[in-house]
Amino acid sequence: MTLTRRDLLLAATGSVAAALPCAAQQYPARPIRVLVPASPGTAIDVTTRFFTERLAKKLGVAVVVENRDGAGGAVGLTAAAKMQPDGYHLVFTGIPIYAAPHVSETPVGFDPLKDFTPVARFNGAALAFVVPANSPHKSLQDLVRAMKARPGDVPFASGGNGSTSHMCTLLLGEMTQSTAKHIPYKGNTPAVTDTVGGQVEFTCNSSVVVPLVKSGKLRALAVTSRQRWEDLPDVPTVAEAGVPGFEISSWIGLMAPAGTPAAIVQKLSDETVAIANSAEFKEFCVKNTMYVEVVGHREFQAAAAAEAAKWKKLAQLTKQ
C-alpha cells in the first residue's frame, strides 16, 4: 500500500496528539521556577509559598520561588512573559497583570491576554486604608476631608502604578470627588514601612498591615471588603465609613507563559485546585485575612477578557 502525503500528515498529527498526554504524565522531570512580581511578605508572596511548598511534595521536584518586584508588578510580569513556555516557568500574579499595562509611565513588555495562559485562581483579599499611629486622621471621612481641602497634595503610598493599593485610592477619590498625591513604591512592603514612618499620610494595603495595626504602629480607618475583617472587627468597611457602594478586592492566581502545552496547564490546574480545596488552605486564608475562591483553568481562561476590561476601565482613572 502506498501512503499519500495526507496519510503521513494525519499519522504525524496523531503521534503528536498522543504524545501530549504522555508528556504530561512524565512532567515534571526537573525543578520548576515560579516568579512572584511582588516583594516578600505580601499577600501574593505568602500565598505563593504556601502553594509551592505543597506542589513540590505532590510533584516530587523542587519548586523554586523568585521575587522580582517593581513598577506595580510590571517588572516581574515583563520577565515572566519572556520565560520558556515549557511548564517549568510559572508566575503567581493578581490584578496588576491587567492594570499595570494601562498605568505604567513607560510601555510594559507584556500583553496580559496574549502572553499568558491562566492556570487557576485560588483566593482573594481585601485591603485596608491605614495611617500612621500619630496621624490627625481619626476616620476615613477625616482623610477624605483632607483630600478635598488639599486636592492632589495629600501623599499616599502604593506598591506601584497599577497595583491594587493604587487602584483602591483612585476609586476612593472617584467616589468622593477628591484627589491625593500618588507616591509609587517598588512594592507594598516599602510602601507600608514609609507609612509607619510618616513619610506619607496613608496607604491602602493588604492584610500585611494587620500586625502593625494591632501593635499600634498604624491606625486602620476602613477596609475595602463588603464585610468587616475578623482580625479588625472594630474597623468599619469603606461603605460603612461613608462611601456607599465602595468595594474592591484583589485575587491571586497562577499563570504560565502562552504556548505552555495544554496537557501540562491542565495538570497544574488540577494539582493546585486540589491544594486550594483543602481544609489547610481554608485555615491559611482565614489566618491571613483572605477568602477562598477556587477557579480552575477553563473558567479562569474564559473570564480573562472580562477581567482585563474591568481593570482597564478602573486604571483609566489615572489619566484624569
Image: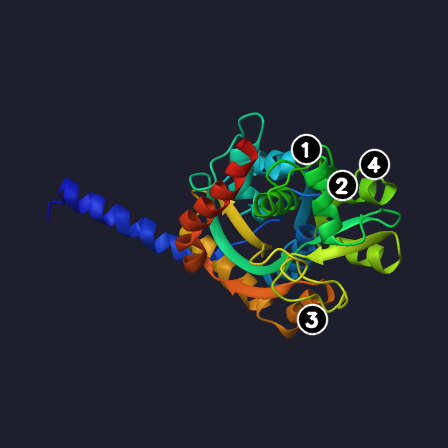
Kindly state the secondary structure of the residue where label 3 is placed. helix
Q: Position of residue 212 (x, y in %)?
A: 84, 54
Q: Is residue 153 above or below residue 295?
A: above
Looking at the image, is mark 1 or mark 2 nearer the viewer? 1
Say which residue label 1 marks.
Answer: 152
Would you say the residues marked 4 and 2 are in contact, meaning their CB atoms lie under 8 Å apart? no
Kindly state the secondary structure of the residue where label 2 is placed. helix
Tell me the CA gap for discs 4 and 2.
9 Å
Kindly state the secondary structure of the residue where label 4 is placed. loop
What label does residue 199 carry, if any? 4
Tell me the CA gap for discs 3 and 2.
27 Å
Looking at the image, is mark 3 or mark 2 nearer the viewer? 2
Q: Position of residue 243 (x, y in %)?
A: 62, 55
Q: Earlier in the sequence, mark 1 or mark 3?
A: 1
Amino acid beneath label 2: Ala
Kindly state the secondary structure of the residue where label 1 is placed. loop
Which is more toward the observer, 293 or 180?
A: 180
Q: Tell whether 291 sits left or right of 211.
A: left
Looking at the image, is mark 1 or mark 3 nearer the viewer? 1
Say which residue label 3 marks.
Answer: 283
Q: Earlier in the sequence, mark 1 or mark 2?
A: 1
Residue displayed at 85% across by 40% down: 198
Say which residue label 2 marks.
Answer: 191
Which is more toward the observer, 145 or 289?
A: 145
